[in-house]
């Protein structure tokens, strides 16, 4: 059986907590994206980016 250090357990626990926070954030973003009132017109942004980076 392998031994596990306290630091490894702490790191794993922190990563689990971060993973749960990320899941909650992404779920909230998906729900927000479903609301059509939050949409913006992306065409001016794309045109500005193309003008800036194409030259």
Image (cartoon, helix red, strand yellow):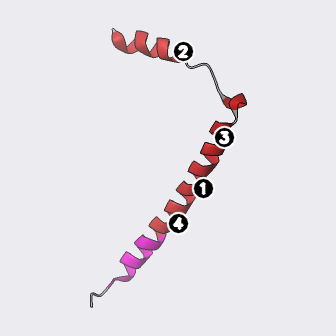
For label 2, the residue is 43
Of badges 4 and 3, nearer the viewer stands 3
The residues tagged by marks 1 and 4 sit, at their Cα atoms, a distance apart of: 11 Å
Nearer-N-terminus badge (2/3) = 3
In percent of the image, x 41 and y 13: which residue is there?
50
Q: Please say whether residue 12 is one of the residues in the magenta stretch.
A: yes
For label 3, the residue is 32
In percent of the image, x 63 and y 37: which residue is there?
33
Q: Is residue 26 left or right of residue 36?
A: left
| Number of dots carrying numbers | 4
Relative image position of residue 36 (x, y in whole percent): 69, 30
Q: Is residue 55 left or right of residue 35?
A: left
Mark 4 crowd level (few <14, some 14–19, many ≥20, 10 Å Cα): few
In percent of the image, x 52 and y 66: which residue is there?
17
The residues tagged by marks 2 and 3 sit, at their Cα atoms, a distance apart of: 21 Å
Mark 3 crowd level (few <14, some 14–19, many ≥20, 10 Å Cα): few
């Amino acid at each position: 059986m392998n031994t596990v250090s306290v630091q490894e357990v702490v790191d794993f626990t922190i990563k689990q907590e971060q993973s749960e926070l990320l899941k909650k954030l992404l779920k909230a973003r998906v729900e927000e994206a479903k609301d059509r009132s939050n949409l913006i017109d992306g065409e001016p942004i794309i045109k500005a980016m193309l003008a800036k980076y194409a030259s």
